[in-house]
Image: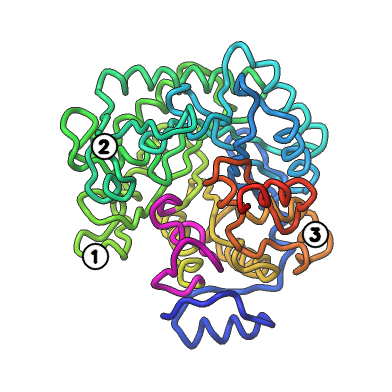
């Protein structure tokens, strides 16, 4: 189906377009269903709306939140969402995606307590999950590429124009497991409700899930490719030793990268998902005590339209954005259907603009996901949840327009935010990079 920008004037036009083109997206007017609370173990999310981890690339030199980052989380907290998935926080300085990525340490622990206290004060009980990360092949701790690869990957290595392949050793991975556990303990001490073992978008742990060509105990077989993630879960549980602490995973269930490099892909056609291994992994994660899963796909560095359907970007995708939206929603539903006891947070709603609440209500009403997550939308429209829950609608004038300028800021080494809706802060930064 031909790619197109958002050009719908009414919800009826979207519904008719989907019906005509066989795109499975449902709508419901029962927005009150989104006000329902969600139980995650011993914690309660006060409603069914959440904010995905949106990295600001604006940390202080010591890895703590800058004033700009504190501003972002204060805005999120006031916005009414029941869950904030706190942005990628490095567990190891070498694994930072940029020089200004957050990095929790014993030395800056009090500053992380500060941001958690701000969220608590402004949100009246929002659940906050810290995303723990190692950026792997996308590491850039000093501002220039310093990739640490999970294995040789002809597709991504060529795309990144890598000349030298620095593949992490088994011994380094074992040590890194301890770094994740230590960082999780620090997050617990800072007052966070849980942590996420970031396993998406082909950062290190996501890459290991697709490391079919890696030799040794962390590659090849399903058991080996999942070893690092599962070991980290076990070590985090042991380090924190509090069953109220949420261990979660943001998981790529479909890489859309050709086999033998992509996880969750049809071996004969990488454009189609094969959810057999992701489902198998989620079942094991649940058995190990993981109770919250954030479902996503693709990688923003290689095929961003897969995880972030857009109106404008670096290239023209081969599909209509609504096809991408439908795939993200359906993927979460597949996982929820196969592992119904897992709390699933869904992805893919921002492109729908002010029509997103009606799709979210349909998904929630039909038990296709438990929490509806918004990413880019939260940067443009931090109070989207308040408007949905109190005004029964989102304002079209506040909505993200999926223009990609926030990503342009990030790619240029600046601090990403909404250039269009948060102009006082981010428009001057954008003008600097397009001189």
Residue located farthest toward the front when viewing the structure as drawn: 435
Image marks 1 and 2: residues in contact by CB distance under 8 Å = no
Residue toward you, 393 or 415 = 415
Residue assigned mark 2 = 225
Question: In this view of the protein, can residue 233 be seen by the observer?
Answer: yes
Question: Which residue is at the far top?
Answer: 107
Q: How far apart are marks 3 and 1 (CA)?
A: 41 Å
Query: Residue visible at 59% across and 48% down?
Result: 409
Specify whether residue 309 is painted magenta: yes
Residue of label 1: 269
Q: In the displayed structure, would residue 44 be above or below residue 326?
A: above
The mark found on residue 109 in the picture is none
What span is in magenta? 297-321
Which dot, 3 or 1, sits closer to the camera? 1
The main secondary structure of the magenta stretch is loop
Quadrant housing residue 194: top right
Q: Report the residue at 31% width, 53% height from top.
A: 264
* Residue holding disc 3: 387
Q: Which quarter of the figure is the N terminus placed in? A: bottom left
Q: Do the residues labelled 2 and 3 touch (CB within 8 Å)?
A: no
Q: Position of residue 30 (x, y in %)?
A: 71, 69
Q: Is residue 106 left or right of residue 218?
A: right
In the rendered view, does 81 fall on the left or right side of 277? right
Q: Where does residue 432 sit, x and y in percent of width and height?
A: 66, 47
């Amino acid at each position: 189906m031909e790619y197109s920008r958002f050009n719908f004037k009414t919800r009826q036009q979207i519904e008719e377009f989907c019906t005509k083109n066989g795109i499975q997206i449902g709508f419901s007017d029962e927005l009150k269903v989104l006000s329902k609370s969600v139980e995650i173990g011993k914690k309660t999310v006060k409603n069914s709306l959440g904010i995905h981890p949106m990295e600001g690339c604006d940390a202080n030199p010591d890895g703590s939140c800058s004033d700009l980052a504190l501003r972002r989380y204060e805005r999120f907290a006031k916005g009414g969402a029941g869950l904030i998935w706190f942005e990628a926080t490095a567990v190891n300085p070498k694994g930072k995606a940029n020089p200004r990525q957050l990095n929790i340490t014993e030395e800056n622990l009090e500053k992380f307590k500060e941001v958690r206290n701000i969220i608590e004060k402004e949100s009246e009980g929002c659940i906050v999950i810290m995303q723990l990360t190692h950026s792997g092949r996308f590491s850039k701790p000093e501002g220039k590429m310093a990739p640490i690869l999970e294995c040789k990957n002809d597709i991504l290595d060529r795309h990144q124009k890598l000349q030298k392949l620095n593949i992490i050793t088994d011994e380094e991975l074992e040590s890194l497991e301890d770094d994740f556990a230590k960082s999780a303990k620090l997050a617990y001490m800072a007052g966070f409700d849980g942590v996420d073992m970031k396993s998406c978008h082909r950062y290190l742990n996501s890459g290991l899930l697709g490391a079919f060509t890696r030799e040794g105990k962390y590659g090849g077989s399903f058991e080996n490719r999942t070893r690092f993630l599962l070991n980290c879960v076990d070590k985090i549980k042991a380090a924190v030793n509090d069953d109220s602490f949420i261990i979660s995973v943001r998981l790529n269930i479909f890489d859309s990268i050709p086999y033998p490099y992509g996880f969750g892909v049809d071996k004969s056609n990488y454009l189609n998902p094969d959810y057999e291994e992701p489902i198998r992994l989620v079942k094991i994660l649940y058995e190990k005590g993981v109770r919250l899963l954030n479902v996503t796909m693709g990688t923003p560095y290689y095929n961003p339209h897969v995880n972030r359907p857009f109106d404008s970007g670096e290239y023209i995708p081969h599909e209509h954005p609504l096809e991408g939206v439908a795939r993200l929603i359906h993927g979460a539903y597949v996982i929820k259907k196969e592992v119904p006891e897992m709390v699933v947070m869904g992805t893919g709603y921002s492109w729908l603009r002010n029509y997103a609440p009606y799709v979210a209500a349909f998904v929630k009403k039909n038990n296709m996901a438990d929490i509806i997550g918004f990413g880019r939308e939260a940067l443009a429209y931090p109070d989207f949840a308040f408007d949905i829950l109190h005004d029964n609608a989102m304002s079209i004038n506040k909505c993200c327009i999926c223009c990609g300028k926030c990503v342009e800021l990030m790619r240029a080494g600046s601090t990403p935010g909404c250039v269009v809706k948060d102009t006082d802060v981010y428009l001057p930064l954008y003008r600097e990079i397009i001189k």
